[in-house]
Image (cartoon, helix red, strand yellow):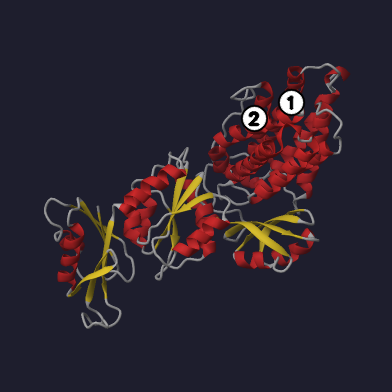
Amino acid sequence: MPDPSVVRFRRVVETAYAYLDARRDEVNDLNVYPVADGDTGDNMALTMRAVLAELDRIESEEGEEVDRTEVVHAVARAALMGARGNSGVILSQIVRGAAEELATRPGDLIDPVLVASAFSAAADAAYDSVRNPAEGTMLTVARAMANAATMHLARLADGDISFSAGLGQGQQDEMLAAVLEAITRAGEQAVLRTPEQLDVLAEAGVVDAGAHGLVLILAGMVAGLRGEEAPEVEIPAQAPPRFSAPEHTDSRYRWCVNFIVEGQGLDGPSFERPLRELGDSILIVGDERTLRVHVHTDDPPGARAVFAGRGTVSQVDEADMRAQVAERERRLAGSRCGLVAVVSGSGLRDLYEGLGATVVDGGETMNPSTDELLAGIHSVGAEGVIVLPNSSNVVLAAEQAAELTDREARVLDCTSQQAGLVAMVELDPGAPLAANADRLSEALAETRTGAVAPAARDDSEGRFVRGDAVGFVDGEVIAWGGAGSTLAATIATLADGAEIVTIVEGAGAPISLDEVTGLVADGIEAEAHRGGQPLYWWLLASQ
């Protein structure tokens, strides 16, 4: 027979995750402390999802006879491994503290007394994980919840605080739900007090994002115990900030870096000093075999190098907090799929961003680092992320970034900016990643590309000399000579059988865009844009 407490736990975690996930953008938009990067909801949801995934793994691999102690230890590790950002790491420690308390009493039923003890241990673990705890945050609310649990028990009769023999599962669930409802209500009131405790919240006119997320999780747990799809303990929506602060004054760094270190004899506190030389907002939690590391820094590789020779670094998560702030401003409600594109040229950046893309600056040589691509992936406010490398030089780095991230990311076979621009029109943010990947891949397969650029050197076959215009279609040289004749021949070749020709003007193009569109044959639609890209006078695409 399965342990009833394990079955119950799986149910309440599932509903808690679902309720938080449904409101993650609301939590994201509240996020102004310690950095207004708009990812608190994402980070907390990812931590909960990791716990749920571990419970599913245990059920499928170990069946009904799994021991509760084994489950709570596995859940604590899953939360640690899945945590991201300050909020996710602190939430993982709340889970760990509660799990450790439950594991110390393997023979006891999980009754209201044990729940209260677990909340007290959870609050202690959360405070212990932070070097300089700030009040007015999820730490404060966790402590208020623990105190509320103790006070609630003090008001109950003996028969209402522990499970007696013969008490049915439904009665047990309701007794636990009553305790968690009191805890949730106390947490909600503590959340409303957070602006009184933290000036940055008062200035923005919001409650603390992590604290609000924690209360949503508890409300979902109550719903799970009562078998409800929507929580009976409804938590009112919180309005976003009155203004968008780019970052809190205590954080001056660009990158939010998270990763796991696995090894032997790891001493977490010993790594704080070298990390503090590289950044701030440092959290190191875990044990001698596994550490979860979080730091804000301008040197992500340097942060990872602190652990060189001491353990294996994995699950690297690096987010550009400046890009996250910008992404929050344009986040689409309910977005399931976002897109990262590598772009060179101010006009092209504007075009991609206008279509909803998160842009990674490729520079003149289209050669961004893996870290920059990782940051782009993690700044997207959606469940899945499509990556358009837009250059053959970028494909390998993009694939490495997709492998390193714990986000669901797909790199598409797109090696030109103009093809990516055409394909991106097909993106549906409300559709899942797989469906969007298929749509964009199909659009890319139906797109031909071309370009005209000044020759950088003399042709070895004697066709052109340095400075002549050279025209390409699908990677092959098809015309050369003067700019006008070369462009006309390239457009004619590309437009054969097409309905639309897209023209993107680059820096220093010698012919006006109006004249260029006149080269497109009648009956074919011409879309012209100023891209500002270096090296290429014109980028071309047709469909």
Which badge, 1 or 2, comes first in the chain's sequence? 1
What's the amino acid at mark 2? Gly
Residue topped by disc 2: 220
Question: Who's the residue at 46% across and 44% down the image?
Answer: 433
Please name the residue that numbered disc 1 is placed on. Answer: 182
406 to 148, vertically: above or below? below
In the image, 535: left or right of 210?
A: left
- Between 157 and 72, the residue placed more toward the observer is 72
| Quarter of the figure with the N terminus | top right
Question: In front: 224, or 495?
Answer: 495
Q: Amino acid at mark 1?
A: Ala
x and y, in percent, of residue 441 in the image: 37, 50
Please, what secondary structure does the residue beneath circle 1 have?
helix
Using the rendered image of the protein, determine whether residue 136 is visible from the camera's viewpoint: no
Note whether 478 is above or below 43 in the view shown. Answer: below
Q: Secondary structure at mark 2?
A: helix
Residue 165, visible in the rendered structure: yes
Please indicate whether residue 61 sits to the left or right of residue 357 in the image.
Answer: right
Left or right of residue 6: residue 103: right
Q: Place residue 359 in its image quadrant.
A: bottom left
What x and y, as percent, mark residue 276? 70, 64
